[in-house]
Image: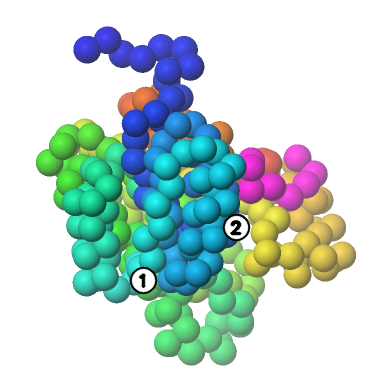
């Protein structure tokens, strides 16, 4: 079969994508980018009402087929049921974006073990559970793209967010482990590592003059990222253009991790 060329390298028409944690923020922006590139999209979250509101808005905006699948990505049984329901009722998944994440800001000496474990379970274990469930079908079909949403905290730490940094560092190595095991079966597994992005969750930091000034000074591009800044790299990683890219974690950070 002839390989795609030109714009077809980035065309996702006919592909089905599941994006976890996609009722708002970065997840919804990533799902929107996939839909605008031609993919049918399955949104995920734990709040059915928020999820269905996002589904309707995304379908109207893009004209794409958009589904909503509420389930808890940290619940192994729920993950298995949801993935089976998607594959049986909607179609085989071609793309998975593991985006679900949570932050916990507290000095490490004060962090309760339960909070540390909650961060790891949400940010890291969920990617293992959903990734493995989706990969079973991808391996059988010998094709698929998995993108794990990491962070600049994959490589860098700051006081007060050690649990988050540990989870994102682990996610980078999980990405490489998935590549090591599944690349030979036709899967491409990579990571997307955003820098500091303006979202509802980071708005208090954006509005803090001292922190905002620090980010702008620390980032060579001199600004925060917008959620839209992440979309192009995701579409590339999900599309045929990146078929020989595997096991990589790609920073989208305005140069923050390139300088000291």
Task: Check disc 1 and report its element: helix, strand or loop.
Answer: loop
Relative to 71, 157 lies left or right: right
x and y percentages locating residue 173 in the rendered image:
35, 54
The span picked out in magenta is 221-230
- Horizontal side of 148 relative to 161 (left or right) equals left
User: Residue furthest toward the right?
Assistant: 209
Distance between the alpha carbons at the discs numbered 1 and 2? 18 Å
- Residue at image location 82% in from the left, 68% down from the top: 208
- Residue extending farthest to the left is 140
In front: 105, or 136? 136
When asked about the image quadrant of residue 199, the answer is bottom right
Q: Position of residue 147 (x, y in %)?
A: 40, 46
Q: Which residue is drawn at 64% across and 41% down?
A: 229
Which residue does the numbered mark 2 point to in the structure image? 25
Q: Residues within 10 Å of mark 2 (few under 14, many from 20)?
A: some
Does 226 appear in magenta? yes
* Mark 1 touches mark 2? (CB < 8 Å): no
In the rendered structure, which disc, 1 or 2, sits on the residue that comes first in sequence? 2
User: Residue sitting at 49 percent across and 31 percent down?
Assistant: 37
Structural crowding at the residue carrying mark 1, measured as other residues with C-alpha within 10 Å and reported as few (<14), some (14–19) or many (≥20): many
Question: Which SS type dominates the magenta stretch?
Answer: loop
- Secondary element under disc 2, as helix, strand or loop, is helix
Q: State the mark number for residue 72.
A: 1
């Amino acid at each position: 079969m002839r390989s795609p060329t030109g714009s077809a390298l980035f065309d996702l028409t006919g592909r089905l994508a599941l994006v976890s944690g996609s009722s708002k923020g970065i997840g919804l922006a990533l799902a929107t980018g996939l839909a605008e590139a031609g993919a049918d999209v399955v949104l995920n979250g734990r709040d059915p009402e928020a999820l269905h509101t996002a589904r309707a808005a995304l379908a109207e905006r893009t004209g794409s087929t958009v589904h909503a699948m509420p389930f808890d990505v940290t619940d192994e049984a729920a993950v298995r049921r949801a993935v089976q329901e998607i594959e049986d009722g909607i179609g085989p998944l071609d793309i998975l974006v593991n985006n679900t994440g949570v932050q916990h800001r507290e000095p490490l000496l004060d962090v309760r073990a339960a909070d540390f474990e909650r961060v790891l379970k949400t940010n890291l274990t969920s990617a293992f559970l959903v990734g493995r469930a989706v990969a079973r079908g991808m391996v059988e079909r010998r094709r698929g793209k998995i993108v794990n949403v990491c962070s600049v905290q994959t490589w860098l730490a700051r006081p007060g967010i050690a649990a988050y940094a540990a989870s994102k560092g682990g996610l980078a190595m999980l990405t490489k482990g998935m590549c090591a095991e599944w690349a030979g079966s036709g899967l491409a597994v990579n990571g997307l590592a955003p820098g500091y992005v303006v979202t509802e969750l980071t708005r208090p930091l954006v509005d803090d003059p001292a922190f905002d000034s620090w980010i702008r000074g620390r980032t060579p591009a001199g600004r925060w990222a917008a959620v839209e800044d992440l979309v192009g790299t995701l579409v590339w990683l999900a599309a045929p253009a990146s078929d020989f890219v595997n096991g990589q974690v790609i920073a989208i950070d305005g140069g923050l991790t390139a300088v000291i």
